[in-house]
Image (cartoon, rainbow, N blue to C red):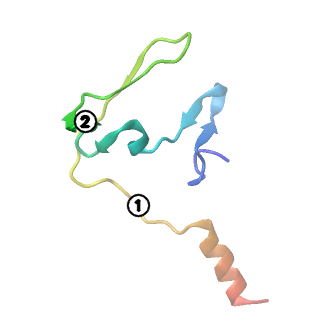
Amino acid sequence: MGARDPTADYALGPEGLLELRLPWGMLLVTDPSRPTAWYAPEPLPIEGIGLLLEGGKPLRFAWTPWEAPAFSLRLKPLYYRLKDLWRGP
């Protein structure tokens, strides 16, 4: 598992760096394109997400709003395996 595995929830990087993949909903972020979090009874604008780890300094993650997410098309590894399987020996 690693950062390039789309099914991984975490990855250990160089020098012990831990990368976590958390769903926006778990963080109560209702609309990541416009930093908005759910705070009953309605969503509120936020300036970012704070993270506090035991023994560490508080971290803040902020991002700029966007209209359309950046993406790139790619073929997943299964495509190549199926292509070879269906091509036959």
Query: Residue 72: which disc?
Result: 1
Is the residue 44 above or below the residue 66 in the image? above
Is the residue 30 above or below the residue 50 in the image? below
Which image quadrant: the C terminus? bottom right
Q: Residue at x 39, y 44 (%)?
A: 25
Dot 2: element: loop
Q: Which residue is mark 2?
A: 40
Marks 1/2 in contact by CB < 8 Å: the verdict is no
The spot of residue 14 in percent (x, y) is 64, 31
- Which of the marked residues, 1 or 2, is nearer the chain's N terminus? 2
Query: Residue 39: which disc?
Result: none
Residue type indicated by callout 2: Ala
Q: Which of 55 and 19 lies nearest the eye of the viewer?
A: 55
Dot 1: element: loop
Q: Quadrant of residue 12?
A: top right
Mark 1, Cα crowd under 10 Å, few <14 / some 14-19 / many 20+, is few
Residue type indicated by callout 1: Ser
The spot of residue 20 in percent (x, y) is 54, 37
Q: Which of 73 and 42 lies nearest the eye of the viewer?
A: 42
Q: Residue furthest front?
A: 41
Q: Which of 33 and 15 lies nearest the eye of the viewer?
A: 33
Cα separation, mark 1 vs mark 2, equals: 36 Å
Q: Quadrant of residue 49?
A: top left
Q: Residue at x 60, y 40 (%)?
A: 10
Q: Residue at x 56, y 54 (%)?
A: 6
